[in-house]
Image (spheres, rainbow, N blue to C red):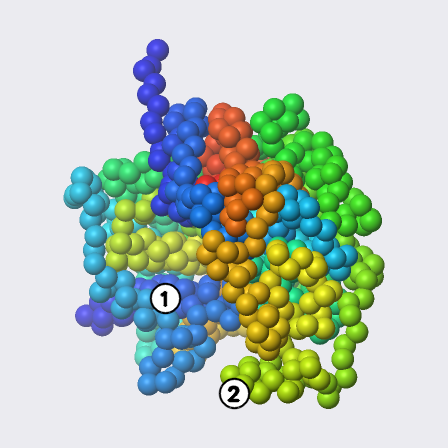
Amino acid sequence: MTHKKSYFLNMGPAHPAMHGVIRLVLELDGERILNTEVEIGYLHRAFEKHTETETWSNAVPYTDRLNYVSPLINNSAFCCAVETVAGVSIPERVRYLRVIASEISRVADHLTCVGASAMELGAFTVFLYLMEGREYLYQLIDCLCGARVTTDYARLGGVKGDLPEGFAERFRAVAPKIRKVVADSEALLNRNRIFLDRVEGVGVISQADALAYGITGPFLRSTGVAYDVRRAHPYLVYDRLDFEVPVGTRGDNLDRYLVRLAEIEQSLRIVEQCFAQMPEGPVALSPWEMKDAFTFEDMGKAGSTALLPRCLAKTCRTLDGSGRDKAAGVRADEPALVLPSKEEVYGSIEGLMNQFEAVMWSWGMRVPAGEAYHAVEGGNGELGFHVVSDGSDRAYRVRCRPPCLFIMAALPQMLNGGYVADVVATFGSVNMIAGELDR
Amino acid sequence: MILLGWTAAKVAGALGFGLGLAGFLGWVERKQSAVLQDRIGANRADIFGWRILGLFHPVADGIKLMTKEDFIPRGVLRPFHDLAPALSLGCCMVCLAALPFGGEFEAFGGSWSLQPLPSPVGLVYVLALLGLGVHGVVMAGYASRSNYGLLGGLRGAAQMIATEVCMAAILAGPVFLYGTLDLQEAVRWQGRLLGGWLPAWGVFTQPLAFLLFLVAGTAASKRTPFDLPEGESEIVGYHVEYSGMKFGMFMMSDFIENIVVCGLGAALFLGGWQVPFAHLGGPLGGAVMLVSFGAKTCALIFLLMQVRWTLPRLRFDQLLDLGWKWLLPLALANFLATVWAVWWLGRHACL
């Protein structure tokens, strides 16, 4: 009888697969994992506390930093929650715009997750193919809201601006490219013996355990539960859209990979349907009635307001926000909650006052007292915000339900008994985003 | 005296070939992966504004590694920590000497062999030193006093045993066919034609052994899908506690191992320096031999790089399964089949 001694391997936060934001302490017997301890909190930024100290509309940019791979979903989720408390109903077109933005973000999220977990198995080429696809989506997001990652697209009661010119055509040009990189990656991996050996039957979690841990999203669906917030509790316009909820059977890394790839296709379909169903925004004005926004600004500074009643400002709809012609289409008619359009601010004293009141400390927009929980289907699962308002200009309490926190709780169970090499594979399929995990 | 000078020149040539190609491979690796992955690849290093597709990057890398701080963590086992990269690089560099870069040619009233180290047991020499090289890996992992390094070192040791045993079993087939352990003799044997039109290269006479050799050879040179000792996204590797040129030496030894394995493959399976249907003689013939061998080696290296950028990495237990349960039995079956075929053909006087 030999004396066997286990040893510890401290994985992270300085480890290539741990993103610098998480630490796993593994107790090993050779290459086999006996015990895992997950230490989180390296990226804690007090998001929830922050939202209590900022006005309602100023809290929206913080949500960009939650799941920074799919920030557009967070933006809409937070705004939907606040609107639920305030009892504001948003225009039809806004609902579609939010769905379009969310689904584009979801595709980017899934591409990143699948690519990163393939890279951690050594398939570097697949990672770069998928990143190329994500780049196309980031360009779309860039032309939608002027930023690639810190999008801040949704506004309380609306969105920042309407779709830019030719957005649908751009998307139709991008969608085949996404399908192509996904097909390329599937060709490289789906029948690859090495890849299948590495992911099949690895990181298994049973359906009962997944439910018990409160896991949602692709992770839960890989175990065979067809729970999707978009289907189970439809929000925005998901009840009018036709999409499938792909499910797996075994709950292992392979199923999660397949579920994510299948969801990419569904998300692309959803965006297409949105373009077809979306109500038209207000019609465009004839060019001679339009003047550049800076003209208004200059005239206003010079004290000349004769131009204002006759013309409308032409603003870049993505960078400066919506013009007056479009603002009605993409903002709720709630002056107490919604920021005025930019040329009202630039061009009229009422608009300027309105804007100041809205953003000024202790003056700003107020949400009636009450509380609500609103959940959306995020990239990783059910992303929910529980918002409590005491009627002041800022939140009394905001609680964010980050989907990957619950998966991380189950991580030790999936890793124990496996090999060190499988840590990165399973961890990659969790799609841990520290921004939303640690908040 | 002349002979000594000639040998020194050959050794210097072999080393220059290995080191130069290792540096060049760094560039090829980057550019090839870039083409494969729709990227541009490294193209910024320049000398007086000349960039030449980033060809100066290996030079820049070399300067960087040489001038970088040689950081040695506290608590490492000092002499072994320093010795490991030297052992790793040294073992694979001396392998280069035994490769048959060319045959013999007549010039200046004498016969000149292009092989730096003609030896009747050249193959055994190469395999032994390739196997010895893993001591550097294990030593590096152990001396680093880091669990990551230790894991890498242990993986390296287990992988080496699995693949070197298979390698020997795989090469037993061609060796029996050629009837020699001398690499030069093996190349000469492949100079004949089968049926008057097919060159008797190992790849035609021993196709199974060639495929198995590619797998075992990739594993022996620790490249993806068999880069377990390194496993950069998992355990960072046995050289995790090394920096500067010592780290560079490990990288270089990987490249040179690759060159040695591909050189061995070219010599045993692709006819070495032979050019089909051509009789090579004289100084010009000697030059053609060198080019032919170099081209075949590079073609194999290119193939292995292509594999590297296509496949993911195996897991430790899967690699051992592959080695012991698939490669070894297949190699032994191939050997038995070869023995039987040689006996049968010898009896019927066909070969």
Name the amino acid, label 2: Ala
- B94 sits to left or right of A284: left
Tell me which chain the residue with mark 1 is part of: B
Identity of the residue drawn at 46% across and 72% down:
B291
Residue A55 at what x, y percent from top left?
50, 53
Q: Which residue is mark 1?
A: B23
Give above or below for B13 relative to A434: below
Q: CA distance from mark 1 to mark 2?
A: 67 Å
Give above or below for A425 relative to B192: above
Q: Nearer the viewer, residue B25 or B10?
A: B25
Tell me which chain the residue with mark 2 is part of: A
Residue B92 at what x, y percent from top left?
33, 53
Q: Nearer the viewer, residue B240 or A162?
A: A162
Identity of the residue drawn at 34% across and 44% down:
B238
Q: Nearer the viewer, residue B38 or B344?
A: B38
Residue A232 at what x, y percent from top left?
75, 37
Identity of the residue drawn at 23% across and 70% down:
B5
Quadrant assignment, res B194: bottom right
Give the foreground label among 1 and 2.
2
Q: Which residue is mark 2?
A: A302
Crowd band around label 1 with a 10 angstrom C-alpha radius: few (<14), some (14–19), many (20+):
many
Image quadrant holding the N terminus of chain A, namely top left
Name the amino acid, label 1: Gly
Residue A156 at what x, y percent from top left?
62, 55
Identity of the residue drawn at 33% across and 81% down:
B47
Q: What secondary structure is marked by label 2?
A: helix
